[in-house]
């Protein structure tokens, strides 16, 4: 089972909030979660109330090999949980084109 740390949408129309969850990668976005880790509310103006997360549990899941989504990764870097250098995804090397023999 591949575990991801990703967002789950809730709230009303045009006023969405998000929960940060550890979830099986094959599960739907709003499907069954393994563990709820925190929340993110982008509409709140106060940055301290905008994002809240259980740092110990996130560290536990990252230690177990869970992969955060791009949005969650950016939030974790902003919160100082994941260092910026680790947050960057490794870039894929371009495939070498076969040289034509004359």
Image (cartoon, rainbow, N blue to C red):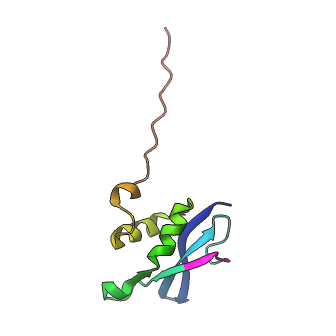
The residue depicted at 67 percent of the width and 69 percent of the height is 27
Range covered by the magenta-colored residues: 31-36
Relative to 45, is 100 on the left or the right?
Answer: right
- Residue at the image position 57 percent from the left and 80 percent from the top: 36
The answer to whether residue 9 is left or right of residue 73 is right
Q: Nearer the viewer, residue 85 or 10?
A: 85
**Would residue 68 be visible to someone looking at this image?**
no
Residue 97 point in image, percent of width and height = 48, 26
Expressed as whole percent of the image width and height from the top left, the position of residue 29 reads 61, 73
56 lies above or below 52: above
Q: x, y percentage for residue 49?
A: 36, 88
Residue at 66%, 72% (x, y): give it.
28
Instruction: Pick the residue in front: 45 or 13.
Output: 45
- Residue that appears at 61% across and 64% down: 3
Q: Position of residue 81 (x, y in %)?
A: 39, 69
Q: Quadrant of residue 76?
A: bottom left
| Furthest residue in direction left, as rendered | 46
Determine if the magenta segment contains residue 32.
yes
Q: Is residue 75 left or right of residue 3?
A: left
> Magenta region, mostly helix, strand or loop?
loop
> Magenta stretch: residue 89 in it?
no
Is residue 95 in sight in this rendering? yes
């Amino acid at each position: 089972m591949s575990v991801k740390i990703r967002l789950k949408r809730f709230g009303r129309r045009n006023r969405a909030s998000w929960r940060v969850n550890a979830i099986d990668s094959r599960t739907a976005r709003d499907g069954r979660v393994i563990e709820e880790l925190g929340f993110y509310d982008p509409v709140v103006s106060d940055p301290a109330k905008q994002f809240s997360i259980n740092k110990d549990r996130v560290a536990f899941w990252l230690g177990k090999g869970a992969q955060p989504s791009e949005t969650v990764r950016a939030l974790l870097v902003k919160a100082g949980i994941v260092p910026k250098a680790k947050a960057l995804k490794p870039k894929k090397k371009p495939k070498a084109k076969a040289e034509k023999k004359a």
